[in-house]
Each structure stands twice: as C-alpha cells, then as structure tokens.
Image (spheres, rainbow, N blue to C red):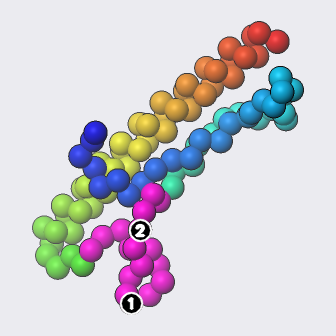
Amino acid sequence: MSNTLNKFDYVMVKMDRKDNEELLPFVPFVEITLKQWGTSSYHEAPSLSGQLITHKEIDDHVQALKEDLDAVGKRAKDALTKSQEGARSYKSLT
C-alpha cells in the first residue's frame, strides 16, 4: 500500500450489459473525487488538512496531497485502460 494521505479516489463509469443486452454505448470515463474530508470549524467548505501553522507544515502537506493525487491518477488511468480494453474485446465479439 502506498504512503499517501488517502484523501482522493476515483469513480469508474462504464457501459454495462444486462442479460446479454447492450445498453446505450458510451466511452468509459473516470471522475477524480474526494474520498474523505472534514468540515472547517470556520465555514462549511471541505477541509483537506488539519490546522497548519508553519510554512514547513504547509509545504509538507501540499506535497503529500500532490503525491496522493498522482497515486489516484495512476490508479484511475489503469482502470480506464482496462475498461477500454474490455469494451474493445466485447465489441470484437459482436
């Protein structure tokens, strides 16, 4: 398991088949999402950090968020590629 903050995730949306009947075709896609968040005590916006009080804390946390986004981006790309390959395989069978 990676050493990220685990604040981001992705959702895969792809065409499904029901009882061997193809639904309306569309290209699979992913959306990058917030996996978890807290609410700031000062306003209703999602908070992606604790209270950061030094420049180093800010830099370290921002770097960790970037690494987290990079990790979920890679997972989302892998899932999209796999989904697209599956769709091509299914299309070639029909």
Which residue, as the protein is rendered here, is positioned at the far front?
A: 19
Is residue 66 visible to us here? no
Question: Is 15 displayed left or right of 7 in the figure?
Answer: right
Q: Is residue 70 left or right of residue 30?
A: left
Question: Which circle marks residue 37 in the picture?
Answer: 2
In the image, residue 51 sits, relative to residue 83, either above or below, namely: below
Question: Tag 2's secondary structure?
Answer: loop
Residue 80 visible in the shown view: yes
The disc placed on residue 42 is 1
- Residue at 43% over, 42% down: 73
Give how far across and how far down residue 9 sits, in percent.
46, 50
Q: Is residue 51 above or below residue 86?
A: below
- Dominant secondary-structure state across the stretch colored magenta: loop
Count residues near mark 1 (Cα–Cα under 10 Å), then give few for <14, some for 14-19, many for 20+.
few
Identity, as a three-letter code, of the amino acid under mark 2? Trp
Q: Position of residue 67 (x, y in %)?
A: 29, 48
Which residue lies at the image location 27% right of the left edge and 41% below the top edge?
A: 2
Please report the bounds of the magenta region as a residue range: 34-50
Q: Percent x, y for residue 38?
A: 40, 73
Q: Secondary structure at mark 1?
A: loop
Q: Residues within 10 Å of mark 2 (few under 14, many from 20)?
A: few
